[in-house]
Image (cartoon, rainbow, N blue to C red):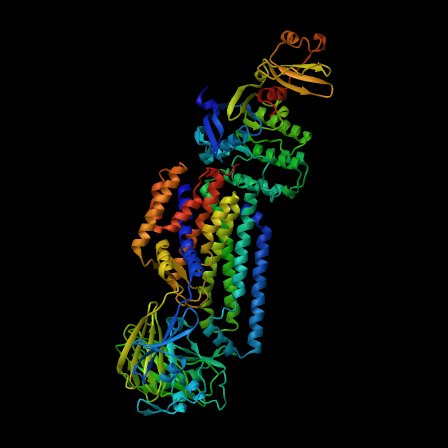
Amino acid sequence: MKHIFYKEKIKLNRILLAVIIINAAVLIYTFFRVRVGIMLNEPSGIWLDIILRNGIFYSKVETALYVSALLLGVMQFYPEFERKRFRLSCHLPLNEYKMIFYTSLFGIIVLTVLWLIDMAGVVLLASQFFPIDIYRAIPLVMFYWYINSLIIYTFASSLTLEASWNVKLRLALMMAGCIWAFKMEVYNSSLSYAVTAFLFAVFYCFSIYFPALRFRKGL
Amino acid sequence: MKLYSKYLIVLIAVFSFSIIMPYFYSIIFIENTSKDFVYYSEIIDDFAVSTFTQNRSFIYRDKAGNTYTEKEFKQILPQVYVRDLVLTNSYSEIINNRIISAEDMIKYNFYLSARAKNIDEERIRIKLSPVFETQSGSANLTMPVDLARIGKDITFINARTREIDKEKSEHFTNELINKGFTFPVKLYGTNPDVRKPYDVGTFLLDKNNTLFRLYMVKGKPVVEKYNTNISNEEIIYISIRENKYADFYGFMIAKSGNIFLININHTLSKITVDNYNPNKDTMRININPLHILLNISTDKYQYTYIYDKNYNLLKSYSLDIESSLSGYRLDIYNMLFPFSIYHDAYSAAGYLKIEKTENLLLSAVFIIFLLCIYIVICRYFKSISKTTVIDIFVIALSGIYGFTALILLQNFKKDTLWE
Amino acid sequence: MSFNNTIISVSGLEHSYGSAKVLKGLNFTVEKGKIFGLFGKNGAGKTTTINILMGFLTPEKGDCLIYGEKSSQLSNENKSRIGLLHEGHISYDFMTLEQTEKFYKGFFPKWESKTFAYFMEKLGLPKNRKIKHMSCGQRSQVALAVLMAQGAETLILDDFSMGLDAGYRRLFLDHLNQFVKDNNKTILITSHIVQDLERFVDEAVIINKGQVLLSAPLSKIKDGIYGYRLPLNADIKNIKKDKRILDISITKESYEIITRLTLEESKKYFQGITLSENIIPYNVSFEDAFIALTGKY
């Protein structure tokens, strides 16, 4: 596994840097935006606005996360698709199901770490301006963003890896509907729903096997 | 693993299509429907209905079937069209042997409502609320610098410093306890809007289901207890609105569907309601000098109840609600989609609702048809194999969703990647 | 032929793309220690065969076994014994030479660092040079270095010559020759540039229209095939390709006829077209024989 991760890290060096920069920039921007808002208005009014209107003041982080997921998915698997480089990985003396799993797992781990950093950043930022009642409700909202980002990553990976444009289009039709299925715009939604959504996302992540095995075995 | 990966895609596609196909069908085939607005006329002693038709015109009628012109309709509903009638000098102060001036008709006419979505939102809203100075002395209230966390006690948090105002918190908490309040707060309701000249306060239900009113005068808490027994009701929603002419502060809704008006004289007035599920339906009340009109809208029906001023039920009337998909369009919808998944990103519960078809038989027939088509297609392209049994099973369970996914994944020409 | 000596075994291979049958029952074996050339024109089924051999295509019918296992279901142990060179010398372009070695070392416990270092020394590039910044020829050296260093016993090389000039093609084969002979490796190799492999392969199989046209040691491929040059003023209008006349080419100096006729037979055959003394035999190359057997299109 560590060797596959080594390869993926080399492959994604610049992309990793890019997504870190994008997310860091968005976090910093959000911090200053909130700070300005609090400075220029009565803070209790801002708090109330967030409470009454489910104000997701850190919504740009969601965009950054999804863009990162898309970039990771495409840039991780485009080199594999281009010139059928995936064949090299398939011939490594490693169980190919594991190889596919580890390759995808790398992207998922990167996304997870990114999300955790984003979440920590937003909670830390929010704790400077808001009471615990508000910032402890943030992780659950961002958890749904994480679920959606996993789906976007897998969608992008699967479509990128798929060698046939005909099948790419079909996969897009079949898998696209899930992308916004778990979008969440309110605080304190149901936890059981979040668990169901996460299980679905895990299930969805395994769909990378379809284009990978088509590549490998010529389905 | 090849097989698993294929059927994994099929399952994902079934989920995906069950969201997007019904959605696109609905937006393509949706019809403009007529909407009924039901009132009660003391003048004709019957329900009066104005229908906004698909042609964007109004039809006015009563329950007995008589039709009216617009002018006549307004005449029989003075409580609804008082301003129009005053403008045209056709308002009559004598209504059913009662004298009610136009001014009183306007002043003492109140509209209250609650949608399932409101109840949902309140249930999960972050429990921080402003406690306003009850009289601001100006047209609008001033936003306080702190918000109160209402739960196991009352804790005031200064929004500028994010520090707890211990003194104020203890003062308010103790005042409530002294008046008989038992923490934790089960439910509370307030109107957190500054755009009003005064605030009636926050209404809290304690652990024993007793209602208390808490408001602030010159920074000091004032607590009033409602000595009413509603311990057998599970209150799920409290709505408060300031109105200087009303003799109530707001209302509460119980899980049973019963409604309680919170009167200013520390009593509750119970309105017993049938056919009302607060978690699904929309409720509207009009309290006017003549009567109390309660309207419950479900997804299929509209129920209207008339109560006297003592909250005794006098009459009721129900109407079907026209669906935006009806007739053959609805039949086709029920036939095509054995189930549909609906998602709302702004729903408080954050759920995915699964709705099954309303016509199981029609759906089953269509699924059998799809199965036949699928087998014919497989035979024509000579692609029948052991997995066709699994395909049949998938189509039988998921109908058009599974059928579409399997057709999209079918390798009819047996082309491969290497061409 | 015992099982232990047969490394690659292809039997009854059939495959179609849609309604077009590409392979119609291909059979051949590759013995241990042999250098085996797989030849065929474009569209003959060579690429399909190679893809099946490499395990990226499952044939409709027939078997393709390597070390007794199906080529599409090789165990990890056998995967490490087989080196694949993909068409175009595909490698992880985003890696440097140093990273490439570090990566592959992790998968092959028997990695021969000295062998890799030898190739890198020949290449003469810094270790931190990325493969994508190298020329085609340099990339081919890197690909070969990886194959050699991983200690593969069997190599399957798909069109090793693609994109390489004459110099790099020769260099590639020189390296290959050196290591193959020393270590008794088994090789299956293809190339579009047929004459390159004449100096390299032991045995050849020529496939045409999805079937084996000829399978024999290289020396015997040319058996019974003769080449004659006729002057340009010879009247060859009436000479048609048939079982005896395999191919007619024109160069700037003469006609070149590839035929199954011996010199005596050809003198009689070409009587009336040109004088006997103008019929000059020449040594038929493998490429000549290949074109003669498969046709020019």
In the depicted structure, whether residue C169 falls above or below residue B45: above
Q: Nearer the viewer, residue C267 or B244?
A: C267
Give the tally of numbered discs: 0
Visible residue check, residue B185: no
Visible residue check, residue B58: yes
Q: How far from the left and from the top, in percent, is residue C210? A: 51, 26
Residue at x-position 61% and y-position 11%: C261
Q: Quadrant of residue B45?
A: bottom left
Q: How far from the left and from the top, in percent, is residue B223? A: 36, 87
Q: Quadrant of residue C157?
A: top right
Q: Nearer the viewer, residue B182 or A207?
A: A207
Q: How far from the left and from the top, in percent, is residue C297? A: 60, 25
Position of residue C282 in the picture relative to residue B77 (left or right): right
Quadrant into which the N terminus of chain B falls: top left
Position of residue A42 in the picture relative to residue A202 (left or right): right
Residue at x-position 56% and y-position 74%: A37
In the depicted structure, whether residue B316 falls above or below residue A14: below
Q: Nearer the viewer, residue C193 or B416?
A: B416
In the depicted structure, whether residue B290 falls above or below residue C168: below
Q: How far from the left and from the top, in percent, is residue C149? A: 57, 34
